[in-house]
Image (cartoon, rainbow, N blue to C red):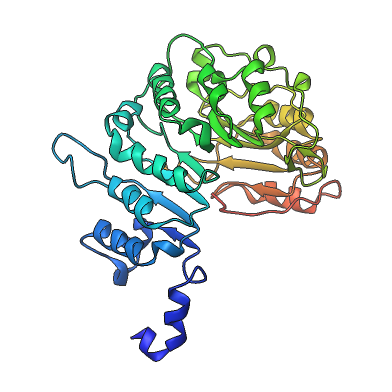
Amino acid sequence: MAVKAFPAWNRILHSSLGFKHFENDREYAQSVQALVSNNYLLEEITCIAQYGQFFTHAVIWLEVFPSADNPEETDLALLGALATHCFRLKSLVIYHPPKLSPSSIMRSGARYIKPLQRMFSFNPSLDLSLCRVSFLSEGTQAGLCKLLDWYQEHNVLQKVACLDFSHGKMESTLRPMNSLVYCTSLRVLKCPIQYLNTQILQQLVEFNLQELCLISDVHTGHLFYDEQSAIDWHGLQLIPGRNLMAGFHTGLNQILVHYVFRYDDVVLCPNPYARSLALDSLCDGISRDVLISIADTYGATLEMFSIIEDVWYPSDDLVNFSDLEDLPTTFQYLASRLTFVECVVPGQTLDSQFCETLSLSECSESKFEPDTF
């Protein structure tokens, strides 16, 4: 009907102007009554078959993976459809199911890896992002290493531009993940910090690493990982002339490092590349010492500061702070030292005094953005 009423739409729909970006976001569809469907997969494949030749960017959320009970009807058919119809793709982002283990990805075999190989065959410069490779699974470090080796054997690992395996069960032994040095196209890496050391990071920087998101959680603490001894941030040799990302306030081309401290203790290490820091549902609350340490350690580089509360406890009224009597003074000190912060994400129900202090401080021009996460 729309095409009949507006004939020009037909021309737009059959061009890259109409379909620059494709994403099968089923959660959004389920939130809009008119978009609810009994067979999302069929409709998505039909759309790809009809308009896929015009897609230049695609984001695929894989929800149904092969299993013993249902080996055929899975979302891997989406990858096959993209490989068949989408010859203009410049970038592809794949989100894996939250509880999917690395071994399950390898068991999917040709239905997973062959479409990727085919897409690279007609576009070797395809920008591939593999997200949530180990999100809520019980996959171990050994399993992740085998998965990276599997990607490498099929000439996919060398093509990955963004790799995210920020969750999962860790080993009881502290070992760096040396398989990462084969990620020769990697620009963005999101992973537990205990997987890294200076040698791995130096190799990735030489390839073209631009951005790091480092997760420190209970596994990091249990392994007694010491960032200061494992990574010599000041000793990293950046490659002149590389297209690295510029910091907001420095204007310099440097790697950007984002820290996420989740649940466990906060142990800070001086890092000239630190650009953002998030405190995610710390079990023991946020103490005065933690905030003072953040101000003193990263005051000269931090551009974004976030305080996040666990979504599993929506009844909690406020972010959990300790040393409540010192909060006003602590906030003022924090605001005076974080002079380059461009964005503050204070969580859903953070005390307004923190926001007011950062917004009104004469020493800071921070921008307050509530409810960003």
The relative height of residue 142 versus residue 62 in the rendered view (above or below) is above
- Residue reaching furthest to the top: 173
The reply to whether residue 321 is in sight is yes
- Residue reaching furthest to the front: 122
The relative height of residue 267 versus residue 48 in the rendered view (above or below) is above
The relative height of residue 317 versus residue 152 in the rendered view (above or below) is below
The reply to whether residue 177 is in sight is no
Q: Residue at x 37, y 84 (%)?
A: 2
Residue 35, position in %: x, y? 31, 68
Horizontally, residue 341 falls left or right of residue 22, namely right
Horizontally, residue 32 falls left or right of residue 301, namely left
Horizontally, residue 155 falls left or right of residue 362, namely left
Count all numbered tags in the image, as a single digit: 0
Q: Nearer the viewer, residue 370 or 50?
A: 50
- Residue reaching furthest to the right: 362
- Residue reaching furthest to the left: 69
Work out which quarter of the rendered image holds the N terminus and state it.
Answer: bottom left
Q: Residue at x 33, y 32 (%)?
A: 105
Residue 173, position in %: x, y? 46, 8
Residue 366, position in %: x, y? 76, 50
Residue 28, position in %: x, y? 38, 60
Q: Nearer the viewer, residue 2 or 119?
A: 119
